[in-house]
């Protein structure tokens, strides 16, 4: 009996030992598995992060739960049940084992490629690199200089006409055969428009109209167009046609034919349309502007233009507009350009580092734009008031400041790109005629609250300006002529 009990005891002991040993084996295997998961299972880790993130998002936005966060929440619930249900755990383990196996396989792959048989050298490549037309263009320029030949015409200039130091215009033609227009080059907007064939506004009746039926290259578009300027607005429809300026031709240029030019703003204007020369981001209807198309179509080899304006009142020689890499030395002599980066690609905006009137600093670093479509200069209220205090002029309710024409005005200094650009005091005062025929003098600075400082023609007249799309920068060189 005792013997039988002993044998039974021994059998039970053996069974217990065997079972324990088996369990130990299983647990040690699963231990190594979880290590592997910790080492290299990215999917698993990101799941954990998502789960904890989900808790946050569920709390913060319970009312508007996205389908994705609902899904995550479900996953979270499953995780809770997992602790209670062993069957579930087994399923999960199975899934994880499969994932880990796949993971180990991919790990093995990567380790063999970086193994001893070869040395892998990391290539220094730029992510999201796209070969741009700029690259092609600079390659062309390189080839041209190395082998001494030229690719077609790559630059050109058009003469500006100055009307009363207030409007600078130039010639532009649209269509085949060419229909000629007078347009205002405007760096403060980005759309091209001319008077349309069916516009009945008074302003339209006074200007040259584009006739689509007379152009063999006209392509109908029909999309509606509307633009609001500081001084007025126009409405119209879009069309495509060939556009030429400064001897350079762009095909398929989208522009607007006006249907309405309300009010009196454009009635007395000396131009039939406006040529916007800013960045595409401020272009109405997302239309690609003319200069950008010149660059895209390789019409100019250097994606930039320059404007030099002459003063001295009305003149057919009011300066010039240069496209591509043509020299402005006829206006800037040997003066070199001072460059500053564009800070916001919409208008031609940059940081004016400081502004002085006489020896007094009226502003530290402030955003400014160069706008050939504005005749004077504007300043936000605080700066405007400081300037006027030094000039000793009298502010009007319409945001101008009147002064005696005999006033002695100090020089104004703009600090741009670390250089001092000076505007002579007598250029800060402009003579204007009142509606009663009296001549008065006003400061070139006009109040425009909550906007960057605007440097208009009153500035460009003294500094030829390069608008460089390739390097996204502005360049300024003093003009050599007396104005
Ligand atoms: C007009 O020209 C642009 C390119 O400047 C092109 O994308 C667009 O499709 C053209 N529109 C029509 C109606 O051909
Ligand atoms: C203008 O663009 C449209 C659409 O991209 C194209 O079908 C048409 O051939 C182009 N016309 C010219 C003259 O380039
Ligand atoms: C532009 O022309 C000048 C000479 O006028 C030259 O020195 C410069 O390298 C040219 N730049 C480009 C980008 O072609």
Image (tube, rainbow, N blue to C red):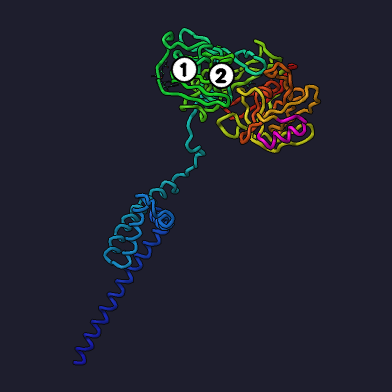
- Decide which of tag 1 and tag 2 comes sooner along the chain: 1
Task: Between residue 353 and residue 116, name the one nearer to us.
Answer: 353
Quadrant of the image occupied by residue 422? top right
Asked if the residue at label 1 sits under 8 Å from ligand 1, the reply is no
Q: In this view, does 276 lie above or below 315?
A: below
Q: What element carries label 1?
A: strand
Q: How crowded is mark 1: few (under 14 residues within 10 Å), some or many (20 or more)?
A: many
- Report the residue at 39% width, 51% height from top: 64
Residue 439, given in percent of the width and then of the height, sits at 73, 18
Q: What element carries label 2?
A: loop
Disc number for residue 194: none
> In this image, 330 relative to 87: left or right?
right
- Report the residue at 30% width, 64% height from top: 89
Quadrant of the image occupied by residue 380? top right
Residue 182, given in percent of the width and then of the height, sits at 56, 13
Please say if the residues under marks 1 and 2 sit with CB atoms less than 8 Å apart: no
Quadrant assignment for the C terminus: top right
Quadrant assignment for the N terminus: bottom left
Q: What stretch is highlighted in magenta?
A: 380-395
Task: Between residue 261 and residue 128, name the one nearer to us.
Answer: 261
Asked if the residue at label 2 sits under 8 Å from ligand 1, the reply is no
> In this image, 413 relative to 346: left or right?
right
Q: Is residue 164 above or below residue 401?
A: above
Residue wearing tag 1: 257
Disc number for residue 264: 2
Ligand 1 positioned in quadrant: top left
């Amino acid at each position: 009996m005792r013997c039988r009990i002993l044998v039974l005891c021994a059998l039970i002991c053996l069974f217990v030992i065997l079972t324990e040993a088996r369990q130990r084996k299983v647990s040690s295997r699963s231990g190594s598995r979880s290590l592997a998961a910790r080492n290299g299972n990215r999917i698993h880790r990101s799941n954990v992060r998502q789960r904890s993130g989900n808790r946050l998002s569920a709390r913060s936005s319970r009312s508007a739960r996205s389908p994705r966060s609902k899904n995550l929440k479900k996953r979270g619930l499953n995780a809770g049940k997992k602790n209670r249900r062993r069957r579930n755990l087994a399923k999960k383990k199975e899934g994880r084992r499969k994932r880990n196996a796949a993971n180990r396989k991919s790990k093995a792959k990567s380790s063999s490629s970086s193994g001893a048989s070869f040395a892998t050298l990391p290539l220094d490549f730029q992510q999201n690199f796209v070969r741009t037309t700029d690259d092609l263009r600079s390659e062309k320029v390189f080839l041209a200089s190395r082998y001494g030949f030229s690719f077609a015409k790559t630059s050109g200039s058009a003469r500006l006409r100055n009307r009363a130091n207030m409007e600078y215009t130039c010639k532009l033609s649209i269509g085949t055969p060419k229909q000629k227009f007078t347009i205002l080059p405007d760096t403060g907007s980005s759309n091209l428009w001319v008077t349309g064939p069916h516009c009945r506004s008074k302003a339209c009746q006074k200007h040259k109209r584009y006739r689509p039926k007379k152009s063999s290259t006209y392509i109908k578009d029909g999309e509606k167009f509307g633009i609001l300027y500081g001084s007025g607005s126009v409405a119209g429809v879009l069309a495509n046609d060939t556009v030429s300026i400064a001897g350079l031709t762009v095909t398929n240029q989208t522009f607007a034919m006006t249907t309405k030019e309300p009010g009196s703003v454009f009635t007395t204007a000396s131009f039939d349309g406006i040529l916007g020369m800013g960045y595409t981001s401020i272009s109405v209807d997302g239309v690609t502007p003319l200069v950008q198309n010149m660059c895209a179509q390789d019409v100019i080899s250097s994606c930039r233009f320059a404007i030099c304006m002459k003063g001295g009142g009305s003149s057919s020689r009011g300066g010039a507009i240069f496209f591509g890499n043509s020299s402005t030395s006829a206006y800037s002599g040997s003066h070199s350009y001072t460059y500053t980066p564009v800070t916001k690609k919409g208008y031609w905006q940059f940081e004016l580092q400081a502004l002085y009137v006489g020896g007094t600093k009226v502003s530290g670093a402030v955003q400014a734009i160069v706008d050939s479509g504005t005749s004077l200069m504007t300043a936000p209220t605080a700066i405007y008031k400081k300037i006027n205090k030094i000039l000793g002029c009298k502010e009007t309710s319409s945001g101008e400041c009147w002064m005696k024409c005999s006033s002695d005005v100090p020089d104004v200094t703009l600090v741009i790109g670390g250089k001092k650009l000076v505007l002579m005091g007598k250029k800060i005062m402009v003579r204007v005629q009142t509606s009663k025929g009296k001549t008065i003098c006003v400061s070139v600075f006009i109040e425009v609250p909550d906007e960057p400082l605007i440097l208009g023609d009153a500035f460009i007249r003294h500094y030829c300006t390069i608008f460089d799309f390739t390097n996204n920068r502005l360049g300024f060189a003093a003009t050599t002529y007396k104005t």
